[in-house]
Image (spheres, grey):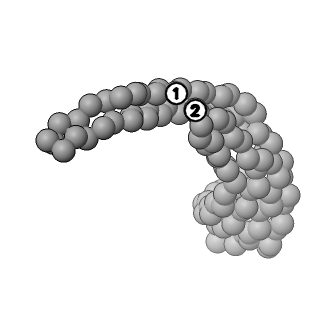
Amino acid sequence: SLFLEPFVSCNYLDLSAKRTETFSAVYPDGTSQTLEQWRDEESINRWLFGVGVSVGGRVDINGNWFVDAALAVDRTEKADMDVGPNTVEVDPSGYSVSVQVGRSF
């Protein structure tokens, strides 16, 4: 038998990022000097919601045993955060493939 299942997802994002930027001078004699250095660190925690669909099928093997196979796509909202002058963007949307062997009681 075939199935098509829509679903809603709720994902918890825990994101941390660090960056270091160094401004240096290199002189003709080969020596160098750090003129300035910047360090930035940020973190966010938030819930991201999404929607998806799973498409698959079930094959009965014998008696109560079966095999399920499915392909799912999940579209989840993106998140971003600023770390110094840069922006980090995360897109947790994705695909999954599953195969299951089971027994009905």
Say few, some or many: other residues with alpha carbon within 10 Å of mark 1 (under 14 / 14 to 19 / 20 or more): some
**What residue would you read off at disc 1?**
40
What's the residue at 25%, 41% (across, down)?
Answer: 26
**What residue would you read off at disc 2?**
84
What's the residue at 76%, 39% (across, down)?
Answer: 48
31 and 98: which is toward the camera: 31
User: Percent from the top left, x then y, of residue 80?
Assistant: 69, 40
Q: Is residue 93 above or below residue 39?
A: below
Q: Amino acid at mark 2?
A: Gly
What's the residue at 74%, 56% (across, down)?
Answer: 74
Find the distance from the CA under tag 2 to the CA under tag 1: 6 Å
What's the residue at 64%, 60% (across, down)?
Answer: 96
Say few, some or many: other residues with alpha carbon within 10 Å of mark 2 (under 14 / 14 to 19 / 20 or more): some
Proximity of marks 2 and 1: CB atoms separated by less than 8 Å: yes
For marks 2 and 1 on the same chain, the one whose residue lies earlier in the sequence = 1
Left or right, 34 with respect to 36, comes to left
User: Percent from the top left, x then y, of residue 49?
Assistant: 80, 42
SS for callout 2: loop
User: Percent from the top left, x then y, of residue 104?
Assistant: 71, 55
